[in-house]
């Protein structure tokens, strides 16, 4: 195989290690990927996400700076950059990063969620509702989307619809077998979030 292919395989291996919480092995795989193909931005993106997850903001900043030189127009770089700005409490800069992504790709839903969280904090509830309503109607049950959409509705005084959003999501999750929900952490998180917001803190998913 070419070094470029091996580099991509090492990134996949590193991500697998990350999912198993084997962070040292993951970092070794990402470093090997970088040595095999120094022009591949994927290991730096993965290491940046890992650094953010571990709250290592200095390392994340170093990786973001390196990525700006390597792939300055990467949407994934702008997402990582925005997430780092959020951790640094620089929400306006984070918003700029997410806006750049959505200007290039309006369907980049992760950037939509991140942008919505900032706008919710800024009190722009109508904008959040307008941007997340289509995703809800498409039955995209991402926990962050459900939470942000219902919160924006509630804070706008549209409490009946806010409750309906939570109830519909809860009912559809309850139709799934418990073992399926357990295999998808986002569904487990969504179920717990709904239960909390509905005041049923003891509900089990």
Image (tube, rainbow, N blue to C red):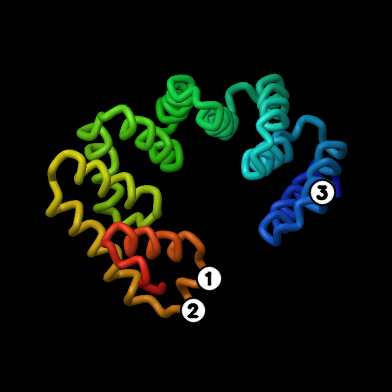
Q: Is residue 74 visible?
A: yes
Determine whether, in the image, residue 36 is placed left or right of residue 158.
right
Residue 25: give x, y in percent of width and height. Answer: 82, 53
Q: Residue at x 19, y 57 (%)?
A: 163
Q: Secondary structure at mark 2?
A: helix
Contact between labelled residues 3 and 2, with CB atoms less than 8 Å apart: no
* Disc number for residue 183: 1
For label 1, the crowd category at 10 Å Cα-Cα, with few meaning under 14, some 14 to 19 and many 20 or more, is: few
- First-in-chain label (1 vs 3): 3
Badge count: 3
Tell me the distance, in whole angstroms, between the alpha carbons under discs 1 and 3.
25 Å
Q: Quadrant of residue 172?
A: bottom left
- Which residue, given by chain and number where applicable, does mark 3 sit on? 29
Q: Secondary structure at mark 1?
A: loop
- Which residue, given by chain and number where applicable, does mark 2 sit on? 179
Relative to residue 198, is residue 123 depicted above or below?
A: above
For label 3, the crowd category at 10 Å Cα-Cα, with few meaning under 14, some 14 to 19 and many 20 or more, is: many
Q: Considering depth in this image, is 6 or 84 the residue closer to the camera?
A: 84
- First-in-chain label (2 vs 3): 3
């Amino acid at each position: 195989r070419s070094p470029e292919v091996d580099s991509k395989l090492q990134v996949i291996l590193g991500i697998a290690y990350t999912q198993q919480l084997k962070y040292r092995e993951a970092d070794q795989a990402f470093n090997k990927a970088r040595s095999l193909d120094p022009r591949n931005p994927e290991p730096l993106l993965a290491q940046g996400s890992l650094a953010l997850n571990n709250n290592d903001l200095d390392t994340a900043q170093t990786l973001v700076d390196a990525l700006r030189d390597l792939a300055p127009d990467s949407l994934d770089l702008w997402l990582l950059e925005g997430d780092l700005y959020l951790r640094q409490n620089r929400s306006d800069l984070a918003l700029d990063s997410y806006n750049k992504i959505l200007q290039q790709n309006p369907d980049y839903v992760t950037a939509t969620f991140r942008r919505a969280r900032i706008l919710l904090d800024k009190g722009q509830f109508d904008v959040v509702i307008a941007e997340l309503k289509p995703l809800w109607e498409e039955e995209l049950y991402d926990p962050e989307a459900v939470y942000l959409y219902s919160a924006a509705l509630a804070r706008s005084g549209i409490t009946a619809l806010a409750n309906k959003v939570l109830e519909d999501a809860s009912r559809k999750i309850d139709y799934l077998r418990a073992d399926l929900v357990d295999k998808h952490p986002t569904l487990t998180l969504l179920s717990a979030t709904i239960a909390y917001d509905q005041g049923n803190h003891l509900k089990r998913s």
